[in-house]
Image (spheres, rainbow, N blue to C red):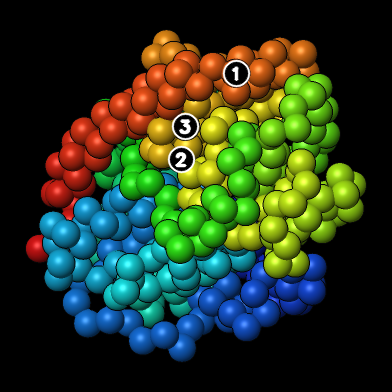
Amino acid sequence: MTRPLPLALYGAATGLLEPFAPALLRRRARRGKEDPARLAERLGRTDTPRPVGPVVWLHGVSVGETMSLLPLVSALRARRPYLRLLVTSGTVTAADMMARRLPPGVTHQFAPVDGPAAVRRFLDHWTPSLGVFVESELWPNLILEAKGRGVRLALVSARMTEASAERWAKWPAAARALVGAFDLALPQDEATDARLRRLGAIPGPRLNLKLLGEPLAVDEAELGRMRAAVAGRKVVLAASTHPGEEAIVVRAFRDLGRDDALLIVAPRHPDRGPGLAREFAAPLRTAGQDPTGPIYVADTLGELGLFFRLADVVVMGGAFLSGVGGHNPLEPARIGRPILTGPHAFNATALYADLFAEAAAIEAADDPALTRHLRGLLENPAIARRMGEAALAYAGRQGEALDQALALLDPLLPA
């Protein structure tokens, strides 16, 4: 297919740079950013045989995006059991999570870098019939090469920032070619819908995959053991926190002045756990320690389901300092927990607006407000329980969007 000049130049430039990709990937692997045993996958090579039958390929870049694909994976397996599902992601953390969460029979691979040769090798091997991209993964070589081979394409739970839309608008023909490659585009919010239309797409109904899903899994035996270790204390969980946020929550927690409370800090990036444990003189989960003091650092991967269930109140990170934009509050909502967030949850504005309207979440504008809301919820368990019930009810109503999305995807699926 003929590409507009900017995309043709991009393809030529990435082709010239592609020979340097192995060295770059090895350097990233030394920093823990790539899996050294699976670098070949990033170059479009694999030892994993292609399964017999039609392949549907689903792609998300990192943990949040790939986790949001799980309800779609489950629904496709239930409705079209003959399909062979391939899930790709771009980060080591997402790959680790997929190893734990994908059902048997679903293949995971690292996505290829967006070089022409790597993309061709990947598509030559897997020959998917349909590619489903989630959120904002618009890699030109990958998308246009797949389109040129006749692969049907869908962009679901699409999210595009204004800054990204403005960048693409500088090359209108390239933007139209890229968004026009998708047979189906389902934006997750009104703003993305408008931005995609400005670039030449014709979006379908709204779908936010992060609103869907089952409650996070838990080891019931470990949950019972940890409840005994908590010993009846009120538990505040600071989930998915980023640098600087832990200090804010710890100050607010200490200002409560309660000896019967425990703060569990679960950083977004678990490798920060040992440093946080030293900073707050707190026991560390990966060191095999139990929550004996007032603060406990939970630095394991895949155990948020455990800590959400232990919590009386959940403080969702990513929104107490500018720049991150907040994280998905539906995970604690599915377990029926009251939610506190900061003032900078711009990635989930509409979602939090719904939760505020349902009295299922509260925004803490500053440190004193966080202390005040924590105190109110811990001292009034009936109010906390009603908030948690409202959050659970809201989360339960979101499944209708998945049925609508599956109906729209149905014509694109191989027979």
Q: Are marks 3 and 1 in contact (CB under 8 Å)?
A: no
Q: Nearer the viewer, residue 178 or 329?
A: 329
Q: Secondary structure at mark 3?
A: loop
Identity, as a three-letter code, of the amino acid under mark 2: Glu
Q: Secondary structure at mark 1?
A: helix
Task: For marks 2 and 3, give the CA distance.
Answer: 9 Å
Q: Nearer the viewer, residue 105 or 253?
A: 253
Q: Who's the residue at 54% across and 33% down the image?
A: 312
Ranked by sequence position, the earlier of labels 2 and 1 is 2
Q: Are marks 2 and 3 in contact (CB under 8 Å)?
A: no
Q: Residues within 10 Å of mark 1 (few under 14, many from 20)?
A: few
Q: Are marks 2 and 1 in contact (CB under 8 Å)?
A: no
Q: Position of residue 61 (x, y in %)?
A: 53, 54
Q: Secondary structure at mark 2?
A: helix
Report the residue marked by disc 3: 337
Q: Quadrant of the N terminus?
A: bottom left
Between label 3 and label 1, give the one nearer the viewer. 1
Identity, as a three-letter code, of the amino acid under mark 3: Arg
Report the residue marked by disc 1: 379
Q: Who's the residue at 78% across and 55% down the image?
A: 283
